Image (tube, rainbow, N blue to C red):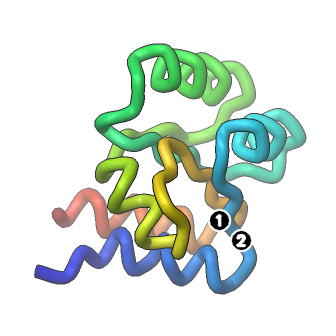
């Protein structure tokens, strides 16, 4: 089955509207460029808590979706526990696709 949410994440990466990796994600959340933070469901509890708290504080939407492997694969990398989308329209589309899954 084709995962449309992961396809949209892949599209965001190709458009240059996505950052991945813990440090880059934290920077995007803090500097206000991040719109949507996606953390893998199999990420550590510490990672989930850290990003959840940051997103609450900086008013960035936070969701848990996919696995580290599936998120990494969608953006052409090895494993990624967290990604941040920096485009409002792509973010809305990804959230909609996840809601339909």
Residue at figure coordinates x 49%, y 61% from the top left? 78
Where is residue 97? Give x, y as percent: 31, 69
User: N-terminal of the two: label 2 or label 1?
Assistant: 2
Tell which residue pokes out farthest to the right in this image: 31
Tell which residue pokes out farthest to the left in this image: 1
The residue under label 1 is 88
Q: Is residue 95 above or below residue 23?
A: below
Q: Is residue 18 above or below residue 46?
A: below
Please tell me how many numbered marks the rendered image carries. Answer: 2
Relative depth, front residue between 32 and 42: 42
The residue under label 2 is 17
Q: Is residue 99 above or below residue 56?
A: below
Left/right of residue 44 with respect to residue 30 in the rendered view: left
In whole angstroms, how far apart are the C-alphas of marks 2 and 1? 10 Å
Q: Is residue 24 above or below residue 53?
A: below
Residue at figure coordinates x 29%, y 77% from the top left? 4
Which SS class for mark 2? Answer: loop
Where is residue 42? Give x, y as percent: 31, 35
Say which quadrant the N terminus sits in.
Answer: bottom left
Where is residue 50? Give x, y as percent: 58, 18
Q: Residues within 10 Å of mark 2 (few under 14, many from 20)?
A: some
């Amino acid at each position: 089955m084709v995962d449309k949410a992961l396809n949209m994440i892949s599209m965001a990466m190709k458009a240059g509207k996505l950052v991945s990796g813990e440090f880059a994600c934290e920077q995007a959340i803090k500097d206000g460029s991040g719109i949507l933070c996606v953390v893998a469901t199999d990420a550590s509890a510490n990672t989930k808590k850290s990003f959840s708290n940051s997103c609450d504080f900086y008013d960035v939407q936070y969701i848990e979706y996919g696995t580290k492997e599936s998120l990494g694969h969608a953006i052409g990398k090895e494993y990624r526990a967290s990604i941040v989308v920096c485009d409002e329209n792509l973010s809305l589309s990804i959230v909609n696709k996840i809601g339909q899954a």
